[in-house]
Amino acid sequence: MKRWLRPLRSLVMTAGTALAMTAGVALVLGVSACYRAVDNYRDSPGPRFTGAATAAPDSVSGTGLKVVTWNVKWGEAAEAAALALATNPQLRGADLLLLQEMHETAVATIAAHLGMGYVYYPATLHPRVRHHVGNAILSRWPLVEDRKLVLPRVSLLMRTRRAAVVATALVRGRRIQVYSLHLATPFEIGQTGLEDQLRAVIRDADGSPDPVLIAGDFNSSTVGGLLVAEGFRWLTQHVGPTAWVVSLDHVFVRGLEAAAEAGVVNDHALPSDHRPVWAVVGLQGR
């Protein structure tokens, strides 16, 4: 290289480094702005939103319990989601419907359309979509003793927290402790963080004397092995992809009988980037 070009090259490299540092500072400032905008409901029992069922269960004497779990992307297109849940032959007639990534208006819309009671707790006032985001349990059966279970770890950039919604469903004279959860992604908190969140749910469930049902968006196709090691049955392990080409949405039970029915609805016209998953659970125990 000619000697007179060396100072010019040095100047260009210095300018490039300065631009990179400026971009990095801008990113940090942007993340900090998101952090200030986040309102994580970590230390308060609420907000809490509930509604009563307006339709009776299809059968009060059967032995099967139909469970559906669905991440309805940001709670968007709630009317379309409600229509699918009411008319799709694999989804309609659900006894328990567990929803993730929801806001209170979307939950109320779907519950009203299906005649189901519900309990919903947002985990955060999300800075990206600027409304509540959390999980819900909808049921044709009475829900009691509901609460929010705050999960450990915060996301790396958005600084948002996750929480599971817990309630006891009184189904045909039996108590079932139900969890609707949406774990963070490994990108946000790492695989160890993802496992920490699920272990928090397992510890909470271990304190229940009743059968337990855990379902939702796990953001993983493998972390469910932790539940299997604790005596849970993985009802939807082999239903196939539930988001893109991976299986992220699952149903687990402990203390209940797993019927030989489970599946995923592969209708790409549905209003979400996740597909609803369903399973039929027996109430006889095992």
Image (tube, rainbow, N blue to C red):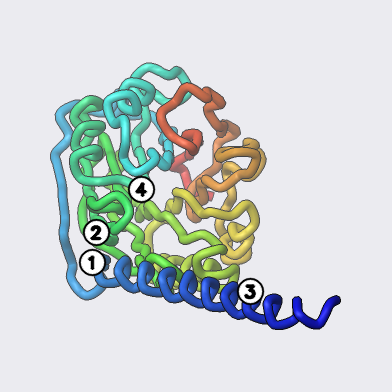
Label 1 SS: strand
Q: Amino acid at mark 1?
A: Asp
Residue that label 2 marks = 125
Question: Residue sitting at 63 percent across and 52 percent down?
Answer: 221
Closer to the N terminus: mark 3 or mark 4?
Answer: 3
Closer to the N terminus: mark 2 or mark 1?
Answer: 1
Q: CA distance from mark 2 to mark 1?
A: 5 Å
Bin the neighbour count of mark 4 within 10 Å (Cα to Cα): few under 14, some 14-19, many 20 and up.
many
Residue that label 4 marks = 101
Looking at the image, residue 106 sits to the left or right of residue 85; the answer is left
What is the number of the mark on residue 12?
3
Bin the neighbour count of mark 2 within 10 Å (Cα to Cα): few under 14, some 14-19, many 20 and up.
many
Q: Position of residue 40 (x, y in %)?
A: 26, 67
Residue that label 1 marks = 39
Q: Amino acid at mark 4?
A: Glu
Q: Are marks 2 and 1 in contact (CB under 8 Å)?
A: yes
Bin the neighbour count of mark 1 within 10 Å (Cα to Cα): few under 14, some 14-19, many 20 and up.
some
Dot in front, 3 or 4: 3
Q: CA distance from mark 4 to mark 1?
A: 16 Å
Dot in front, 3 or 1: 3
Q: Position of residue 212 (x, y in %)?
A: 42, 55
Is residue 280 visible in the rendered structure shown here?
no
Is residue 235 visible in the rendered structure shown here?
yes
Closer to the N terminus: mark 2 or mark 3?
Answer: 3
Closer to the N terminus: mark 4 or mark 2?
Answer: 4
Q: CA distance from mark 4 to mark 2?
A: 12 Å
Label 3 SS: helix
Q: Are marks 4 and 2 in contact (CB under 8 Å)?
A: no
Closer to the N terminus: mark 3 or mark 1?
Answer: 3
